[in-house]
Each structure stands twice: as C-alpha cells, then as structure tokens.
Image: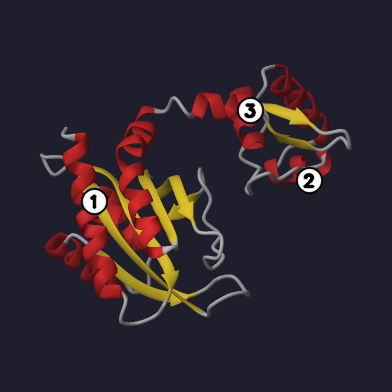
C-alpha cells in the first residue's frame, strides 16, 4: 500500500460504497477501502472539496452529486441507454417486473439502467452495480459476444463451464438466454427467472444486453423470450451503428 498513487486510493474510497443511498462513518469507510483512518480522512476531505463525496450532519459520508454528473457523460452507457429506454419502458409496462440494461466491462457486467415496478419482487441489482458475467443471465448474454480471451478467462474458474457453453450456444442461435435460479434474498419468491438478450450493431459487435428478471412462473418464459428478443433487435436498429 505504501507508495500507492493517491488517485488509486481515492477510487478505493469511492468504491467502498456498495448500496444506493448508503452512508458510511469514517471507520467503516477506512475498513472497506483497506486504508488507515488518517489517510481515509485526508483523501475523503479532498474528495469533498471537489464534490465527489458529501458529509451528513451526523458525520457520515455519502457519494456526491458531482459523480452523478460526470457518470452521466459516459458515452458507452448513456448513448445505449437513450436508445434502449423507450423499449425498456414498453417491456416494463407489459411485464411489471425488472428490466435491466448492462454493458460489459472486463469480466463484469455494469448495470446502466433498471426499471422496476413498485410491486415487483425485490432484487439486489442497482444502477452502476457490477454483476459477474458467469452467474447472471445478462452476464451470459454479454459473455457470449465477448472476445475469445475474455470468455476463456471467465470460464476457467467455473465448475460447470460446459453448462455455460451450452447457454452461450443458445444465445448465438436464438439471440436470447433464459435461466432460473434461487432468489439470493430471503424475502419474496424462492426462485427467479432471468431472460436476457444481447444488443449488437450491424457488424455483430456487442453494444450491451437487455434482461427481464421476474419470479419463476414457468409458462410465461416463452412469451418473455420473444418480447425481449424483439426489443433487443429494435434497439440495434435504433442505434444503427
């Protein structure tokens, strides 16, 4: 840690926030960042000076609005979000569940938009959050069209890589990935269903992926697959790259 550039330490502090609206006292912020309290305090004050962090009346730190302003300028997520949002809203109106939009960043999926009905089953996904490519439907849709090296590296540590390869083969053939799994939250339905589809440009290059996450209700998945595949193609045509 000695000699680590201050920019890297600053990003470790910012990366300590993992939940929307989360506030952290100094000692917890330092523990999550893996830095001494004195170092954390000094850098946090500098981050407050540029609006990247804010401090509440009780002394706890929160993410500052300046980060939101900067993040909104990211072209890879923002342009895709603008094109996808009308179709996401249509899916949201029909399904009344969670509609996700993500892009790939290395070996993770980064969620750039989420639409959720008020009465939809609770999920842990949040805008700006990161999801493993090999454990989520939207991640598998992205991984299918990732470079060979990224795909091989991601699968190298997976116990049942053959199952994921079959899922990716389905994505290539049908343009959609469907899977079910246990709900990681202790509340709500015990099993969740995920249907995801990649968004490609006219050259077949990956732009992102759409996903619907809902309680597993068996017979509804076929209709959801068609709707999601149609939406992903519509986004691709809208972007027209």
Looking at the rendering, which quadrant does residue 44 occupy? top right
Q: Which residue is mark 1?
A: 232
State which mark lies toward you, 1 or 2: 1
The x and y percentages for residue 114 are 46, 50
The x and y percentages for residue 126 are 53, 50
Q: Residue at horizontal 33%, vertical 31%?
A: 79
User: The C terminus is located in which quarter?
Assistant: top left
Mark yes or no: residue 133 visible.
no
User: The N terminus is located in which quarter?
Assistant: top right
Residue found at the far right of this picture:
58
Q: How many other residues sit within 10 Å of disc 1, few (<14), some (14-19) or many (≥20)?
A: many
Q: Mark 2 or mark 3: which comes first in sequence?
A: 2
Checking the image for residue 65, the label placed there is 3
- Residues under labels 2 and 3: Cα distance? 21 Å
Looking at the rendering, which quadrant does residue 61 occupy? top right
The x and y percentages for residue 11 are 60, 32
Query: Are the residues at dot 1 and dot 2 in contact (C-beta closer than 8 Å)?
Result: no
Q: Which residue is mark 2?
A: 28
- Residues under labels 1 and 2: Cα distance? 41 Å
């Amino acid at each position: 840690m000695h000699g680590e550039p201050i920019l890297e330490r600053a990003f470790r502090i910012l990366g300590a926030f993992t939940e929307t609206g989360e506030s952290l006292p100094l000692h917890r912020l330092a523990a999550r960042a893996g830095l001494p309290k004195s170092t954390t305090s000094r850098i946090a004050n500098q981050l407050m000076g540029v609006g990247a962090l804010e401090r509440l009346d009780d002394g706890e730190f929160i993410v500052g609005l300046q980060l939101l302003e900067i993040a909104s300028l990211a072209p890879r997520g923002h342009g895709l979000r603008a094109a996808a949002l009308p179709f996401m809203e249509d899916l949201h109106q029909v399904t009344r569940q969670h509609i996700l939009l993500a892009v790939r960043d290395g070996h993770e999926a980064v969620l750039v938009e989420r639409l959720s009905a008020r009465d939809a089953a609770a999920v842990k996904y949040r805008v700006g959050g990161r999801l493993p490519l090999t454990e989520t439907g939207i991640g598998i849709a992205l991984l299918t069209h990732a470079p060979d090296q990224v795909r091989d590296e991601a699968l190298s540590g997976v116990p049942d890589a053959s199952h994921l390869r079959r899922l990716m083969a389905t994505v290539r053939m049908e343009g959609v990935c469907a899977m079910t799994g246990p709900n990681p939250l202790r509340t709500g339905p015990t099993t969740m269903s995920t249907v995801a589809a990649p968004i490609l440009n006219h050259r077949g290059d990956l732009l992102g992926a759409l996903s619907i996450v809902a309680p597993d209700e068996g017979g509804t998945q076929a209709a959801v697959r068609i709707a999601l595949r149609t939406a992903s193609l519509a986004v691709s045509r809208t972007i027209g790259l």
